[in-house]
Image (cartoon, rainbow, N blue to C red):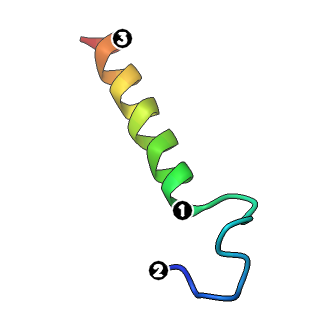
Amino acid sequence: MARPGRRSNHAPLPWWILAALVVVVVALAIVLIF
């Protein structure tokens, strides 16, 4: 969903980084709880 010519390479917080952080947090929560 990246628009070409609109800071596609130098975005402050790309959506995939946020998604990766959410996945890591959920995985750590599951491992710690169970």
The residue lying toward the viewer, choosing from 1 and 8, is: 8
Quickly name the residue at label 2: 1
| Tag 2 secondary structure | loop
Q: Is residue 23 above or below residue 31?
A: below
Q: Which mark is residue 15?
A: 1
- How far apart marks 2 and 1 lie (CA) works out to 9 Å
Helix, strand or loop at mark 3: helix
Label 3 vs 1, first from the N-terminus: 1
Q: Is residue 9 left or right of residue 3?
A: right
Q: Quadrant of residue 30?
A: top left
Picture residue at 69% right of the left edge, 88% below the top: 5
Residue behind mark 3: 32
Residue at 75%, 60% in the rendered image:
12
Between the residue at mark 3 and the residue at mark 2, the CA separation in whole angstroms equals 33 Å
Q: Is residue 4 shown above or below 29?
A: below
Extreme residue in the left direction:
34
The amino acid on which the numbered mark 3 sits, given as a three-letter code, is: Leu
